[in-house]
Structures are given as structure tokens and as C-alpha cells.
Image (cartoon, grey):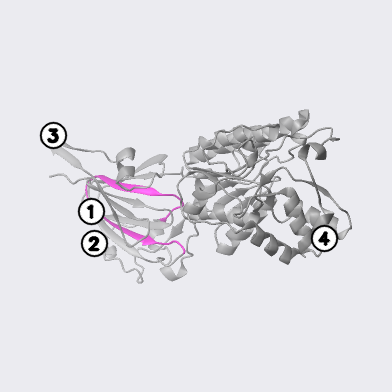
Amino acid sequence: MPKDLAVYTTEIPGLLVIDIPQHGDNRGWFKENWQREKMLAAGLPDFGPVQNNISFNASVGTTRGIHAEPWDKYVSVATGRIFGAWVDLRAGESFGKTVTVELGPDTAVFVPRGVGNSFQTLEDNTAYTYLVNDHWSVDAQSEYSFLNLADETVAIDWPIALKDAELSEKDKNHPRLAQVEPLAPAPFLVVGAKGQLGRELVKQLEARGTPYLAAGRDELDLADPDSWVQAYRWRSLRGIINAAAYTAVDQAETAQGRADAWAANATGVAALARVADQAGVPLVHVSTDYVFDGSLPLGQEYAVDAPLAPLGVYGQSKAAGEMAARSVARHYIVRTSWVMGDGKNFIEIMKSLAERGIDPTVVADQHGRPTFTRDLAGAIVHLLENQCDYGTYHVSNTGDVVTWAEIAQAVFEAGGHSADRVSPVSTADYFAKAEVFAPRPTNSAMDLSKIIEAGFTPRNHREALADYLGKSI
């Protein structure tokens, strides 16, 4: 009787053994070696293979490895039998853990990036096949790791003694485990790394020891895809976080601003979405409350699936960027509002005015919640690190819905100044003399239940403001 399709875990995290149904008659046998829909349903990751390789081995005892490569592999046997051995060479608690399995045509193994792969043939004329999810390149070789087949620490019990086996000279001279540098996880790419959110993302990834690449506008100008589409090995990334955007809301209403906003927020995001989807890596795209018109009655909050209805050019270009990001199979759209972080922001402006004795007029008919970059970056890292369900999330700080004027008053009070120095004003009056200004949503309150249900609860915005001011005063 043929085996049923089944996937089994092993002692090495992410290393999976797969039973493959094999059907035969007097003519021979047939199997579906890789059937994406069925195998995903059985529990295999959707690793997106792009290259199929075959290693033919004429004699019993041919032994190859132990090679850890910077991509995932799906290994199987077309004909013959092998003794396979896998050693975890990734940084972490399972470093050096070993799993061995005998493979024939009815068994396969999924090998995650950084796990050393090796085998020894048990029959003549054995064909060993493997699918990989990145194209081989000379550049990729610098990310390889190797372990000696005879390493005494992992002590693989080879069926045929290595002294009697067929090995290459290179394989004979690979280092022992004590000399192997553990392979770090693939890095995240932070686009817009020099902005308020980008800097906080880099800070948090660094604190966690998570590998990352930081690309500011000098390294990756989102509005100029021709300059960067070929600049990265996209498949070598663990994910892409797009924290870059054109955010000059009022300037976007001018002729040049309109072109610039669409170039960065729509066209550039579409290019980023294409490379992410082709590479099979997750894309996090940060969006905004400005994709809504703010007409929702006060007291209600925008759901993640609320219809988009942007009022101005900035919101329209960001809505277009969302459409592009949504085309990526593995995407997170993270909408946020009223962002405050390291750099020039509303809080810093209010602090400066208070200290200089200037009494501001501040808009009091726009309602929402501020978002501190510590919480926004934390939510993004949480989604990626925990492989949460893909889709759209709203992230701001929790707490009561407030106005810009109320935030300004809180800043004044925290600095020992009278809140009465802040004069509330309507949006219409505030911009009455402005030559160019963008319409703003009246209600920017967003429903945060989805990110909370995913296991991340942002701080109350009043607590976050006190923490921010305590560090900055």
C-alpha cells in the first residue's frame, strides 16, 4: 500500500520529513514529488522554489556535504536510496543538533536555510533531487557554512565508513563544529531607515539581535525604482519593511508635490511589491489614516476593512500604495496615525513654543490617537517575528480619542506651563490664510482589535506621552 501524504517535525526546528504517496504497477511507479496545494495543506511552508537541481551518483558510498546554504531546500530521491544527515548550523539553542533519515522515492525532507545538508548513497545509480527558493550565484557562496563529515561532536553514524566512501577533497577538509561560525538568520531590509519610524525599527531590531539592512533615501530612493530594483538579492531577505513615504501633506497639493507623492507612495511601492512578490518574501507597508475621509461619526472607529475614501493627494497616493502592497501574497499593511518619534514632530514643536513663551492656536476638530514610534515599530516587529496572519492592521496607541489641541495642552502641562496658553481653533480657521493646504480627516480613530488579538497591545497614549516627555525634558 502506498503511503499517505504526511509531514513530520524533527528535533531540528523547521526540518520536516515528508511521506510521499507512490503509485506503481508492472510498468514502474509515479509520484507527485512537489504538489504545492496538497503539501501546503499537509503542513509544508510555501517556500516558493525557483530552481530544480539533480545530483547523479554512480556508486554506492558516494558521500556529499555537510553544506548549509542561504536558502530553503526540498530534497528527495528520484531513483535509488540514500542515508541523509542534517546538522543545524544556525545560531541558537539547536546549533549542532543532528537528524538522520533514510530516503527512497517515497520520502522527502524540507531543509530550512542554515541547516547543513549531506547524504551517502546506498545504491548504485542514485539520483538525488532538490528544489531551492533562490538562484545560485557567486555572491551567495559567501553565506555558505560547512561542517566536516567526520566531526566527532555530531558523530554521524555513516552506514559506510568514510574511509571506504567516495568523498571530494573539499568535503574532507571542512572545519569541525568548534570552528564553524553559526549562520545568522536572513536579514530584514528597512526602507526609509533614516526617518522617525525607520530609526526606531533599526533600534529595536538591533536590541533584539535581529539581522537587518538599513536603507535610507541615499541607498534606496523609493521614487526611483530603476536605481535599486537590481541592487539587492531580494530572495536572500527575511522580509522588507517599507517605512519610507512622501509625507508633505500640504505640499502634495501642488503640481510638483503631486508628482512626487505619487512617485514615492504609489509607483515606488508598486515596484517594491513586485520584487517582494517575485522573491516570495513578506512586505510590510506602512500606511495612514488619510486613506479615509474622516466622515465616520465621532465615537465610531474605522475597521481594517472599511472602504477607502481619501480626501487629498497624499491620502490618494497612499491608498494606491496599499493596492500595490495588497498584490503581494505575503503582505502586512499597517495603517497608523499622528506619528511621534525621534526627530521633528508635533510634540517637539509644542515643547519649543512653550519654552519660548509663544502661545499657539491648535486645531481642535480633528479627532484620533497619536502613535509613538516605539509602539508602531514594536507592532511591526511582532507581526514579522511571530509570523502573524497576513493582511491589514491598524496600529496607534490605545486610550481615549483626543484632538491635536488636547495633545498640545498635555505637552504644555507636562513642562510646567499653563494649558490655557493653547487656544483651540477649527481646521477651517487655522488654514484660512494658507495658499495651499490639504483636507484632513475629522475622525481618524481606528479600531485596534486586530493587532491586539494578534498578541500586541500598544501603550495608552497618555502613558507613552509621559514616557516620551520624561526622556526628552
Viewer-nearest of labels 2 and 3? 3
Separation of disc 1 and disc 3 at Cα? Answer: 25 Å
Q: Nearer the viewer, residue 257 or 296?
A: 296
Instruction: Name which residue lies at 32% across and 53% down.
Output: 16
Mark sitting earlier along the chain (1/2): 1
Percent x, y of residue 82:
25, 53
Using the image as rendered, state which of residue 301 and residue 154 is in the foreground: 301
Q: Position of residue 111 (x, y in %)?
A: 37, 53
Instruction: Report helix, strand or loop for mark 4.
Output: loop
Q: Amino acid at mark 1?
A: Val
Number of the label disc, if any, that sits on residue 418: 4
Of callouts 2 and 3, which one flags the residue occurring earlier in the amino acid sequence?
A: 3
Q: Hey, what amino acid is under mark 4?
A: Ser
Disc sitting over residue 60 in the figure: 1
Mark 3: secondary structure: loop
Q: Do residues under tags 4 and 2 come within 8 Å of each other at their CB atoms?
A: no
Magenta-drawn stretch contains 298: no
Asked if residue 194 can be seen in this view, the reply is no
**Mark closer to the chain start, 4 or 1:** 1
Which residue position is annotated with label 3?
27
- The answer to the question of whether label 1 and label 2 lie on touching residues, with beta carbons closer than 8 A, is yes
Q: Say which label, 4 or 2, has the lower sequence index.
A: 2
From the image, state whether disc 4 or disc 1 is nearer to you: 4
Would you say 454 lies left or right of 99 here?
right
Q: Nearer the viewer, residue 386 or 222?
A: 386
Which image quadrant: the N terminus?
top left
> Residue reaching furthest top?
255
Q: What span is in magenta?
A: 68-91
Type of amino acid at the residue the image marks with label 2:
Ile
Which mark is on residue 160?
Answer: 2
Quarter containing the C terminus: bottom right
* Alpha carbon distance from label 1 to label 2: 9 Å
